[in-house]
Image (spheres, rainbow, N blue to C red):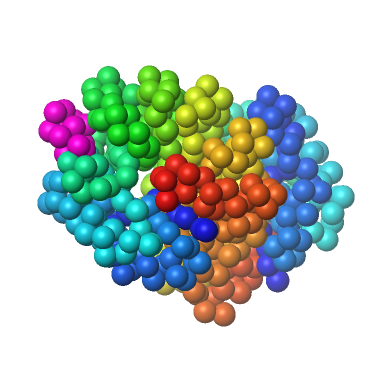
Amino acid sequence: MIVDSLAYLGEAISGPSASAADLIDAMDGAGVDRAVVVPAKPRGYHLGPANDLLAEAVNDHPGRVTGLARVDPNLGDEACAELERALGELGLRGLFLHPWEETFRVSAPFVDAVVDVARSHSVPVVIAAGYPWLSEGLQVGDLARRFPEVRFIATNGGQINISGLGQTDVELTLAACPNVAVQTASVYREDFLENVVERFGADRLLFASAFPLLDMSLEILRAHWMHVDDAQRSAVLGGNAADLFAL
Amino acid sequence: MIIDAHMHVDDIPALGWKMEASLCVERLDEAGIDRGVVMTIVDAPEVNPDAIELVARACAAYPDRLWGLARIHPWYGDESAALLERAFELGFKGLKLHPVSTIAHPSGEDTLRLIRQAAAHSAPTLFHCGDEPLTTPLAVAEAGAACPEATIILGHMGGYFHVDEAIEVAERVPNLVLETSAMPYPAKIREAVERLGAERVIYGSDGPVCSPRIEVEKVRLAGLGADAERLVLGGNALRLFEAVR
């Protein structure tokens, strides 16, 4: 089974938007069986209604998409209550944090409250990572160290820099935090991905497209064409996501 | 013919990076690419006084597959100029500048002197052009505007967050060319071709550690049409680099 471990759904306030039908078309074109979806930042700014719409899409496509709740830790107790609602009433399967779009430092102490809700539900936390100042590799690690029982997944290989200047920070986090994995979307240098598999294990890397921000047909090639063995490739393409998100 | 306009050969123990000419050729073969243009990761004369010779040895080992670009640190005045002249004597095809490693702004006089020296050989200057200060499209465009006789290539065409800016500045500064390596958006290659013309976009991979095979596929996914795709994947690079004297 091939699982895209991150795609965005809904009308976005900036950048491309995608409906569930758009996503299913892209998945069929790229040979993807299932996708883990999160709400795009909505035009109305309020993440609660976006979580509702996401849950509807999940219910409409039960075999194809699995949803994560998006909350803004800046909202404190309100964010915790929304996450409780989304994981309970809406049946979503994890927490998604976007420090860049919601503007918070992912390692800030006040973020602990929503991660603690995820911990209490035993669900993973996906972090839009690699954004300067807010979700750099070591900042993700700083948060992950405080919650060793929570599984964290950093998008974009944990760094967004076209010289690879943040990759050592990510490797330090992967070495120090066995509860952190990274995704493949947009990663600079395929040998970074191969090094994650070789040095830390194939279970620390997940295929993701970040559709519709990125092109799913291109992004899946990073996993298909990695210089690794078939078992490792299978884990990256879907096995790891199936385990992490209990698919 | 497919030409990869952006590859690296180097050996940097401090970073654990070893990019050998043989690996470049292996990756070119894997992707069905005819020729690669290689450069070092660090600069001459500092931090590697041997950087020009290192590239020359790689090209000599694979004369039908590799061309060289000289990565020069602009701060060293006449020594920098002499190194660039030496590179052209060795058959190099242009200049590479990476302002993150040199802390030399593209508009600085030391940098402009090297760009003009390359232009006197009808040779292009390839800049690292990404999201970091000193390398953004607007910063590199300052060099392009100051040296209208030079061809300036924006490597990575703006990186992750500056791609729209790269297309915009290339519309304003006609001697800028966009190079596609590692930038992850196929649709932006198509947009660049539509807005600038296919003659001003060239394929590169930043290989061998970025996958030339994936990077070629990225250009194909852009859906340029056969004629434009031929220019982007090799025709433009052939025209640019064969003009060097």
| Residue A75 is a magenta residue | yes
Residue found 86% across the figure and 50% down from its top: B60
Can I make out residue B75 in this image? Answer: yes
Q: Residue B8 at what x, y percent from top left?
A: 69, 45
Q: Is residue B147 above or below residue A152?
A: below
| Residue B207 is a magenta residue | no
Q: Quadrant of residue A12?
A: bottom left
Q: Is residue B243 above or below residue B226?
A: above
Q: Quadrant of residue A113?
A: top left
Q: Nearer the viewer, residue A222 or B58?
A: A222
* Predominant SS of the magenta segment: helix
Q: Which residues are magenta?
A: A72-84
Q: Nearer the viewer, residue B244 or B133?
A: B133
Q: Is residue B81 above or below residue A226?
A: above
Residue found 61% across the figure and 36% down from its top: A201
Left or right: B110 as drawn, with respect to B50: left
Q: Residue A29 at what x, y percent from top left?
A: 47, 71
Q: Residue B218 at what x, y percent from top left?
A: 54, 63
Residue found 41% across the figure and 67% down from its top: A26
Can I make out residue B125 in this image? Answer: no
| Quadrant where the image shows the N terminus of chain B | bottom right
Q: Nearer the viewer, residue A98 or B42?
A: A98
